[in-house]
Amino acid sequence: MVLIYQDKNSGGVIVSNKKFIVANWKMNKTVSEAEEFLKRFISLNKNIDIEVAICPPFLCLEKALKICKESKIKIGAQNCHFEKSGAFTGEISANMLASIGAEYVILGHSERRNYFYETDKIVNKKVKTVLENKLKPIICVGETLSEREKGKEKEKIKTQIGLTFKDIPPEKISEIVVAYEPIWAIGTGKTVSIEECKEMFVFIKNYLAFEYGLKESRSIRLLYGGSMNEKNAKELLSVPNVDGGLIGGASLNPFKFTDIINQAESVAQ
Ligand code: PGA
């Protein structure tokens, strides 16, 4: 978690950075499989020293909230609709998620953008509803392989952040989490190089500071996602400005996910 406080001696602002690790289970695990995972995961992680959120399918949310109640593990959803209620067959609203005690909502994941035609404009509406319901959005942004090959990755990220952050009240900016997930790295076993990662995270942090102010932007947590696993987590999480990770495949196994948590704890300053 990023905590900002005043340094008594210098009067300057200091940022204490504990990593934030989020599991995105996607369309995996039945309620009983989720229960089995969570019980095992809690027993393996009695003294978590960083922030961890698990985002299971909607159907598992209530059970997950119940099981994790006494632990430090937070629970989030993977999507929601931008309207509060109404004739939207098959949808779930932010209001409904807030009513059961969920804390986070992943929004604008590239799978939702690709398979369900979500645009930045739709994601922006969802971000607003999520914030109005006192939930925290985890906004996913990322470039395709062809955009990266053409050197257009920064332009893409700038556009996605600009549009999904549009008209968000300044006092709400610090609630937002951004996950940079290069689309070509998701579920492929490929990741950005450490140099590419460094460059992108400096770019995003600078862009956020320029657009939304230094103080506000410093409390926006910036995660890396895309084939982060127990073999590369420490290296990726050690890159400056990487505040944590959004993990898909490797979060489905309680042992692998615990390994990642341990690595995140070891690099937390
Ligand atoms: P992955 O997924 O870790 O399986 O690449 C990450 C994500 O899609 O959020």
Image (tube, rainbow, N blue to C red):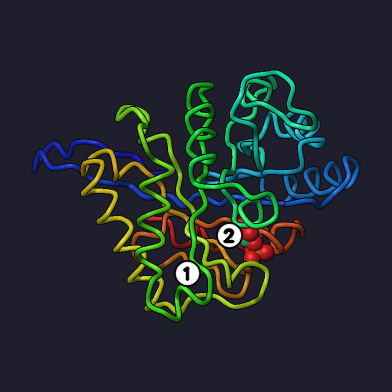
- Quadrant of res 216: top left
Q: Position of residue 203 (x, y in %)?
A: 30, 63
Is 14 located above or below residue 115 in the figure? above
Judging depth in this view, the residue of 261 and 85 nearest the camera is 85
Is 122 located above or below residue 142 in the figure? above
Q: Dot 2 lies on which element?
A: helix
Is 105 located above or below residue 234 in the figure? above
* Location of mark 2 (residue): 262
* Residue 226 image label: none
* Location of mark 1 (residue): 236
- Left-right relation of 251 to 231: right
- Quadrant of res 74: top right
- Left-right relation of 149 to 9: right
- Left-right relation of 29 to 122: right
Q: Dot 1 lies on which element?
A: helix
Judging depth in this view, the residue of 58 and 119 nearest the camera is 119
User: Tag 1: Cα neighbours inside 10 Å, few (<14), some, or many (≥20)?
Assistant: many
Tell me what residue is drawn at x 37 percent, y 44 percent.
220
- Quadrant of res 163: top left
Q: Position of residue 211 (x, y in %)?
A: 24, 45
Q: Quadrant of the C terminus?
A: bottom left
Judging depth in this view, the residue of 37 and 115 nearest the camera is 115
Query: Mark 1 belongs to which amino acid?
Result: Leu
User: Tag 2: Cα neighbours inside 10 Å, few (<14), some, or many (≥20)?
Assistant: some
Going from the N terminus, do you reach mark 1 or mark 2 first? 1
Ligand 1: give its quadrant.
bottom right
